[in-house]
Each structure stands twice: as structure tokens, then as C-alpha cells.
Image: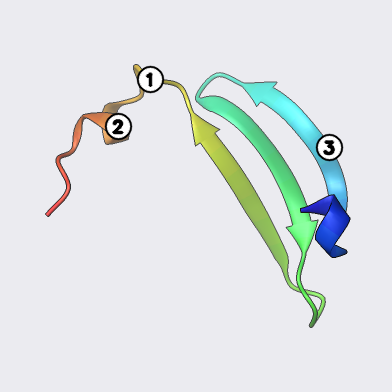
Amino acid sequence: MVAKGITFVREPKKQDYGMVAVFEDLYGNLWDLLELNPDHPITKRSAL
């Protein structure tokens, strides 16, 4: 993402639920990029 010009305002950080990094879009909005732990409850949901 960095190679494509994405600006990260917070580097990846390990949290209880997984890894999170924050990036800024073209309009200044901040987005959380999540990688949830495999044992997180939401990963148990089946895709519809």
C-alpha cells in the first residue's frame, strides 16, 4: 500500500483482537486496517 502512495498515520500495532494500522484516504478520512486474530468471534461467521 505504501508503494501505491497510501499514507499511514499509525504503524501496525498488536491489540488483543489482532493487528491494526490507520491510514488516510485521498480526502483526509482515517481508516483502520484490521487483521483479526483467528480466534476472534467474528472470524467464526460463515460467508453468505
Q: At x 76% / y 71%, what residue is drawn? A: 25
Q: Quick check: marks 1 and 2 in contact, CB under 8 Å?
A: yes
Side of 17 where 8 appears, left or right: right
Residue type at mark 2?
Thr
What SS does tag 1 mark? Answer: loop
Q: Position of residue 42 (x, y in %)?
A: 29, 35
Q: At x 87% / y 51%, what residue is drawn? A: 9
Distance between mark 3 and mark 1 Cα atoms? 21 Å
Relative to 30, does residue 8 appear above or below in the rendering? above
Residue type at mark 1?
Pro
Q: At x 72% / y 41%, what residue is drawn? A: 21
Which quadrant: the C terminus? bottom left
State the image quarter where residue 23 is shown: bottom right
Labelled disc at residue 11: 3
Query: Do we see residue 6 in this rendering?
Result: no
What SS does tag 2 mark? Answer: helix
In the rendered image, which residue does mark 1 sit on?
38
